[in-house]
Every structure is written in C-alpha cells, then in structure tokens.
Image: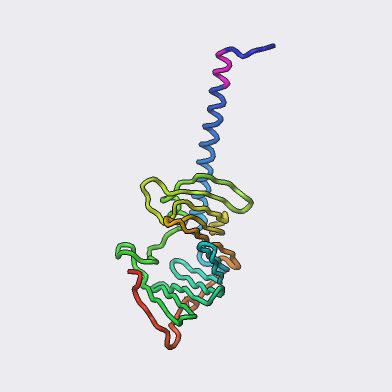
Amino acid sequence: MYRFSNVGMLFLGALLLLLVLFQDSYATKTSDMALRELIKNYESIRSFTGTIETTINNKSSKGSIKFKKPNKVAIDFYSPEPRKIISDGKNIWIYLSRENTTIKQPILPKDRGFSIYVSDYENPFSRLFDEYIVTSFSESGNTYVFKMKPKPGVVTGFTEIYIVAYKQGLLQEFSGITIDKSKFSVKYSYSSINPELDDREFFFSPPANSQVFSNIFD
C-alpha cells in the first residue's frame, strides 16, 4: 500500500491550511462586498411607503410608514393603540392618542448635543460598516443576512445585531440585544419604492386640547 512520505504529509497539511485561510478570507471579502453594495444601492432610494412592526421584549406595535429623504418620516401606528411619529424635516412629533399628548423635538445637528433624531443625512449601511464587524454572513435569494457585533472600542446601543437587507438597498429586518439586555426588532414591508411624496404628507399639527411637551430629550 502506498504511504505518504513526511514531505507529502507536510504538503497536504499546508494545502489544507491554505484552503481554510482562503475560505475565511473569502467570507470576509464577501460580507464587505455585500455591505458596500447595499451602501451604494441605498443612495438610489429617494422614498418609500409600506408597513412597520416594532417589538421590544415581545411587545409589538404595527403601523404604516412613509419615508422621504433626507429626513421626513410619517409612522402611523394602529396596534395595539393609535400613535403617530412624524418628522417634517425640522421637528419630530410624537402623538399619543390615548393620552392626547404631543411631544415636539427639534431636529438638531450632531454638534448641538444629544437628540433623538439628527438632520445630518446618514446612510444606515455606512453606519453599520463603520461601527460593527460581521460575525456571520449569508445570501438568500434577494436578501443578504448579517450577524454583527460592535467593533472594539466603539460604543453602540447594541451588544449584537441581526440584519436582513434587500439587495436593492432597503432593510427587511433589524433586530438585536440592547446594552440593557432588552430584545428589540423592527421589520419592514414595502408597498412602493421611490414614489412621489408631497411634503404635506409629513405635516403635523397637534389636535385641539392636546398637551404639548417640547425638548424633553435634550
């Protein structure tokens, strides 16, 4: 029976090691390429409409969403209770229907301190690329799937995240574990992409007799 020589065994071991290293390198390169593709494709997204579902520790809210770059958003939650979150480009309005209470938060640039929403235009996939490293990556049909964790030394609101993104540059699902160990997720379903949306669709005026609070997040 033919037997490998010591040199042959050494060669085989080196070959297997190179294959493993190549596979790891290929996986990293592929996830980087996918993120760069998403960053590029997101730039072609001007607006969208659809539905949104947010979940925090198994408590879910469902509603409709409209978005127009750079910073106009209208979310109308209908379950479990009516609520509105609207950005008109200058202010964030949060209306709690049951309490008839309105929160008004000016949109501030980052250098003006903490704000729940900033006017600086930001590509969400660029932020992921800057703040997180990919721990696993796969491709499924028209989506990319990532598991990520914060880069060393980078402080984020999550200890780990899970992302499903359509290749055309839109999120399907974002979920993760927050730094206080809460489970958070948001899922999107799109009914139209790049529709013409009038700025008046993002106008909000507090209802009569609504109690209005301003700047509570600063």
Q: Is residue 116 left or right of residue 174?
A: left
- Residue 94 in the image: state x and y as whole percent: 44, 75
Up/down of 181 relative to 78, above or below? above
- As drawn, the residue found furthest toward the bottom would be 208
Q: Which SS does the magenta portion mostly show? A: helix
Query: Does the stretch in magenta take in 7?
Result: yes
Figure coloring? rainbow
| Image quadrant in which the C terminus is located | bottom left
**Magenta residues?**
6-12
Up/down of 199 relative to 119, above or below? below
- As drawn, the residue found furthest toward the left would be 112
Up/down of 154 relative to 46, above or below? above
| Quarter of the figure with residue 7 | top right
Report the front residue among 14 and 170.
14
| Quarter of the figure with residue 80 | bottom right
- Residue 8 in the image: state x and y as whole percent: 58, 16
Query: Which residue does the image show at 58% across and 21% down from the upper left?
Result: 12
Up/down of 142 relative to 116, above or below? above
| Image quadrant in which the N terminus is located | top right
Query: Which residue does the image show at 55% across and 19% down from the upper left?
Result: 11
Query: Does the stretch in magenta take in 156?
Result: no
Report the front residue among 37 and 23.
23
Query: Which residue does the image show at 36% across and 66% down from the upper left?
Result: 115
Report the front residue among 145 and 98.
98
Report the front residue among 146 and 33.
146
- Residue 107 in the image: state x and y as whole percent: 37, 70
